[in-house]
Amino acid sequence: MKKVFFLLFITSISFAQIDRVEPPFWWSDMNLSELQIMFYGKNIAQNEVSVSGGIGIKTVQKTENPNYVFVTIETKNVAAQELVFTFKNKKKSFTQNYSLKARKENSRFRKGFDSSDLLYLIMPDRFANGNSNNDNTKETNEKLNRSKIDGRHGGDIEGIISNLDYIKNLGVTAVWPTPLCEDNDERGSYHGYGQSDVYKIDSRFGTNEDYLRMSSELHKRGMKNIMDYVTNHWGYQHWMIKDLPTYNWIHQFPGFKQTNYRMNSQFDSNASEGDAKLYADGWFVKSMPDLNQSNPLVLNYLIQNAIWWVEYADLDGFRVDTYPYGDKNGVAKWTKAVMDEYPNFNIVGEVWYHNPAQNAYWQKDSKIGAIESFNSYLPSVMDFTLQEIINGGVFNENENIWDKGMVKVYSNFTSDFMYPDINNLLVFVENHDTDRFNEVYKNDFEKYKMAMTLISTIRGIPQIYYGSEIGMDGSKSVGDGDLRRDFPGGWDGDAKNAFIASGRNQEQQKFHDFSAKLFNWRKNKAVIHKGKTTHYAPENNVYVYFRYTDTETVMVVINNNAEKQTLKLDRFKENIKAHLSATEVLSEKQINLKEDLQIEGKSALILELK
């Protein structure tokens, strides 16, 4: 017995030299012809590496840290199989199995989200607690504290799954949760943007298997799964930050230096080199070390991690956090690599600029970016200029003057010529980083209807934020946690459950009924998804535009006055053409297009022309 025990003990020590393998497995028949596997363990770089199966090792790369070795193998035309890596030095050898799995059928040509979709943005910790057993876990630092505005409240993947029917019935076709990978910061970890392991779902949200189940449940309902991805930074508790593979894995000055947040320096022809470098290389905040995407090892790690999640979890898209903050050429290579692997996929970047030209610079094939021979390869960008107009209080502006009211909205769309693909812009009134719409407008239902009508009928991909459909509000001046309140009914013991009609009060029901009717109408309207647009310069603070195809025409009228307005329809005859009547979508009233059109103050009409 003693001898057997001794042999087992020696074997366990040998295998213990490998603590992590990333990616943990891969697939055959990928477009990416090479795979770089990172092996991590105590002094692992002291070993020579070989692999079974006739697979060619292209390179074995070691760094100044002996605990890492990066092994690149050729995978083109390699069948699914179990590989065996052998690590050998003068004293001993040990092996590590590695799986190349069979790829899902037609995985490469999966269809990403597009303008036919409506995205529902969720802060998982604040949406619903479906499994109270994972509220606190041994391997994570921050514990449940629902009384704290910036504490963990316990929402999880199970909570999302259990309410997918609610989301679908609202008219939503795609779900975007904020990051679900492990964030092990001691405080503020609920938002997930300071990730400590990018191959592992945070145990307080659930498991990797739970995430796969969520993706599957979405697809069963004809809905899409969008992962919130972070290319710019990790959390300071990330296991690799504690034992860096190489000094320049992150940007160091040495150590921490905060970015100057001067986003314009990335295309400013007059910018100093120092300003541009500090912006791109500085850390977003002290707790988020800034990744160096110009380091090929880092860039390849991020590319493979993103592709791994798409293939593993059957994803339909990425939303990329702080897109312009990384090395822009490195992040462009990351984007191109993902899109080359999945040509029908979609990626939307958080590109938070204050005018359309600066936003358009970041969209794929931008003529503005081409001036300096830059292409981001990013299919979709977020229309923050429109969002800022809306949440800046435009629906409170009753003045009929040159630069107020609906003229601002109209002017935003006059810049559409700058974008290479206007149908691939994300349009929204709020998100998890902005004041809630219902905070800005004091839960004014009529103004909510105007805003939702606007983003549901213009070009692009509309995104709504969880809870707005029942009138939830929240102020950034109070703190980010106030923008991310718990959805009522998501926790056992909640006084009201707004996930069901009987649990909503009259005000919540009013918001919900309108939202569901509008969003479900949009779901099947190709004229809104891909139609052309003609708009008319606002008169008397009334904005009119048409979405049309060869077979369908929709007329939208938004009256931003407090008083009723009467419109002479002759002005719009180039779009009305021979149509005699229309049906107003929300009220279902019939409209005679041969008469003047009356519209109530602070209201919107959606007219399907007949």
Image (cartoon, rainbow, N blue to C red):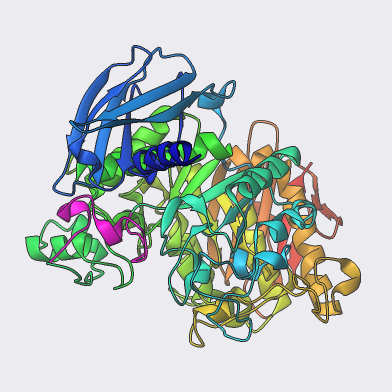
Q: Is residue 321 left or right of residue 159?
A: left
Q: Nearer the viewer, residue 292 or 459?
A: 292
* Residue numbers of the magenta segment: 232-253
Considering depth in this image, is 570 or 112 the residue closer to the camera?
112
Residue 251: x and y, percent? 19, 59
Residue 179 is left or right of residue 61, and the answer is right
Q: Main secondary structure of the magenta part?
A: loop
Q: 304 left or right of 409? A: left
Magenta-colored stretch includes residue 195:
no
273 in relation to 188, above or below? above
The percent coordinates of residue 194 (x first, y second) are 41, 64
Residue at the spot 12% in from the left edge and 56% down from the top edge: 269
- When asked about the image quadrant of residue 177, the answer is bottom right
What is the count of numbered marks? 0
**Residue plotted at (47% across, 27% down):** 99
Q: Residue at x 71, y 68 (%)?
A: 132
Quadrant for residue 275, please give it. Answer: bottom left
Tell me if I can see residue 53 in this picture. Answer: yes
Residue at left 56%, top 41%? 114
Residue 8 drawn above or below residue 146: above
Please check the rendered image and state whether residue 245 is part of the magenta-colored stretch, yes or no: yes
